[in-house]
Each structure stands twice: as structure tokens, then as C-alpha cells.
Image (cartoon, rainbow, N blue to C red):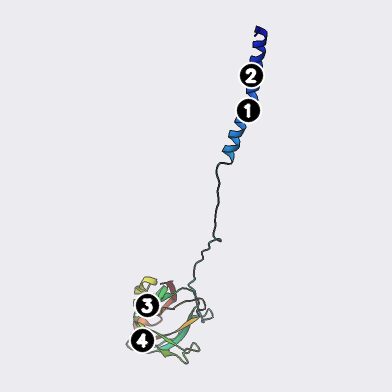
Amino acid sequence: MSVRSALRNKRLVAAASVPVAVIASGALVWQSTYAAFSDTTTTPTSNWSTGTVKLADNDADTALFNATNLKPGATGARCINVTSTGSLASTVKLYGTGFASTKSLGDVISLKVEEGTGATNAACAGFTADTAPAATIFTGSLASFASGRTDFATGAGTWAPAGGASANETKSYRVSYTLSAGATNTYQAGTASIGLTWEAQNS
């Protein structure tokens, strides 16, 4: 073979090797792209919501008592209905807020709070005191109630609404007061005031 022929054959081999390399490279890329299979499965969207604890009363935004011109031995009683419409089981406690007193009048006003059912008006018509647990949840001076029953943790009461999707439970409370028959002239023109708060917390 002549030198010229040998050179021509060498060029043809070199030229032919380029397309083969390109084709081989393309085959490798194709294999890499489609080498992994995959699949997924899902559940429907998950959801969370909270229950409720909700109280209301029938006081029509009116103070339970507005007693004036009291004299020793004076007494009175009023009822209020508290309704739970929350979906969660809870416990309800009563405590005082914003207590104020002049001439220490709160020391000689006794307070009694009872739980029960059936009160149809503020005058306690139809009220029936609970028998179990005991109806009376507080008895003592107004001043002692104010200092000792200041929040849910120290509040008075045994009511435990069961809750539920269609819950609508009502508890009647009878609140009675008496100005001590032994109150002396020291307490003339004295004043006392307190707010009553019922609070529910889920149990």
C-alpha cells in the first residue's frame, strides 16, 4: 500500500469514529434520564379545629343588686341563670371582681350563693336548690368572698357542663345577702360593691 493510500484510510477511520462516539454518548444520556421509576399515593387533606367553652347569662346587663337605704337586719335574694353552649366539657367557677367598700361595710354584709335549677326570673320564682352536691357553694362575709374568691383557681362552684355538639345546659344561682342585725352606727352611710364573674374552663 502506498503512503498516500495509508493516509487516506487513517483519515476515514478517524472521521468515522466521531459519529459513533456521539451516538454512544446519546445512548448514555437517554438511559440516565429514564433509569428511575416513581409513584406516589396521598390521603385527603387533614383538618383540625378547636372546641368551644361558652357562657351566657340572663341579667340583661343589669346589676344583680342595687340595694339602698339598708338598715340592720335587711336581707334580699336574687337569681341568675348561667347557660353553657360550649362543645367541650368544662367546670364553672364564680368569683368576685372590683370589690370596693367604705366604712368596712363589706365586713357586716353576709353573702350566700346556692346552685340549683328552674329559676324563671330574677326574683327566684321556681328555683330549686341542688341536693347533690350540696347547693351552697359560698357562705361568709362579702369582704371574705372578695378577698378569697378572686379568680378561676379560687372560685366557688361545682357545676360541670358536659358539653357536646348540641349542648345547651343552664344552672340557676341564688345569691342572698343580709346586713348584720348587730351593725352599729359605725356603718351608717357605708357602701360596698362587687362584680360577679362566672368563668368556664374546659376539663
Q: How far apart are marks 3 and 4 (CA)?
A: 15 Å
Asked if 35 appears above or below 159 in the picture, the reply is: above
Q: Is mark 1 in CB contact (under 8 Å) with mark 3? A: no
**Badge 1 element:** helix
Asked if residue 110 shows in the view, the reply is no
Q: Nearer the viewer, mark 1 or mark 3?
A: 1
Q: Which amino acid does label 3 sit on?
A: Ala
Q: Position of residue 185 (x, y in %)?
A: 35, 84
Disc 1 to disc 3, C-alpha distance? 89 Å
Which badge, 2 or 4, comes first in the chain's sequence? 2
Disc ID at residue 72: none
First-in-chain label (3 vs 2): 2
Mark 2 sits on what residue? 13
Crowding around mark 4 (Cα neighbors within 10 Å: few <14, some 14 to 19, many 20+) is few
Residue farthest to the front, as pictured: 1
| Mark sitting on residue 22 | 1
Q: Is mark 3 on a helix, strand or loop?
A: loop
| Label 4 vs label 1, nearer the camera | 1
Q: Under tag 4, what secondary structure?
A: loop
| Amino acid type assigned to the residue bearing label 1 in the image | Val
In percent of width and height, residue 57 lies at 50, 80
Q: Name the spot of residue 33 as percent of width and height, x first.
A: 59, 39
Instruction: Indicate which label's residue lies in the foreground, 3 or 4.
Output: 4
Q: Earlier in the sequence, mark 4 or mark 1?
A: 1
Front-lying residue, 104 or 176? 176
Sequence-wise first label, 2 or 1? 2
Between the C-alphas of marks 2 and 4, the distance is 107 Å
Identify the residue shown where x is 36% and y is 77%. 145
- Alpha-carbon neighbours of circle 1 within 10 Å: few (<14), some, or many (≥20)? few
Residue behind mark 4 = 132
User: In the drawing, what numbered circle is on residue 156?
Assistant: 3
